[in-house]
Image: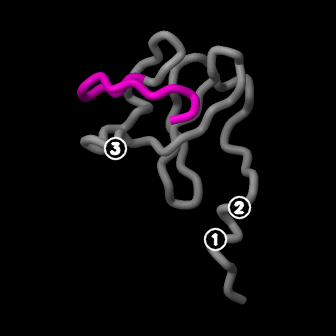
Amino acid sequence: MLVDALALRRQWYVVANSSELGDSPSHVRLLGEDVVVRRGPDSALIGAPDRCPHREARLSRGRIEDGCRVCCYHGWTFGAKG
C-alpha cells in the first residue's frame, strides 16, 4: 500500500517532550527533514526548517537573541514567524 507523502506532512507529530525544550534552539529530524524547535518569548513552541536560506547553516547551532533565532554563520535573525 502506497502512502501519500503529502498527506503525512499535513499531520501533527510529537518531536520532543515539552520539558525538553527551552529557550535555546534544538535540532530534530522529522520525515527526512531537519527542523529547529524552541520556545518563543511567550513560551509558545516554534518549529521551522533547520537551515538559513543564505548558506544553509543549521539554525539549531545558533543562539537566541531578543526572542529571535540568530544564524551561527553570519548572524541573520529570524523571528517566530520566519
SS class, disc 3: loop
Main SS of the magenta part reads loop
Q: Residues within 10 Å of mark 3 (few under 14, many from 20)?
A: few
SS class, disc 1: helix
Q: Position of residue 80 (x, y in %)?
A: 57, 28
Q: Position of residue 19 (x, y in %)?
A: 73, 23
Looking at the image, residue 47 lies above or below residue 23? below
Residue 53 marker: 3
The foreground one among 18 and 67 is: 67
Residue 58 marker: none
Q: Residues within 10 Å of mark 1 (few under 14, many from 20)?
A: few
* Residue at numbered disc 2: 10
Residues under numbered marks 2 and 3 in contact, where contact means CB atoms less than 8 Å apart: no
Rounded to the nearest whole Å, what is the CA distance between mark 2 and mark 3?
23 Å
Disc 1 marks a residue whose amino acid type is Leu
SS class, disc 2: loop
Residues under numbered marks 2 and 1 in contact, where contact means CB atoms less than 8 Å apart: yes
At 27% from the left and 41% from the top, the residue drawn is 54
Rounded to the nearest whole Å, what is the CA distance between mark 2 and mark 1?
7 Å
Q: Position of residue 71 (x, y in %)?
A: 34, 27
**Of label 2 and label 3, which has the lower sequence position?**
2
Looking at the image, residue 48 lies above or below residue 39? below
Residue 6 marker: 1
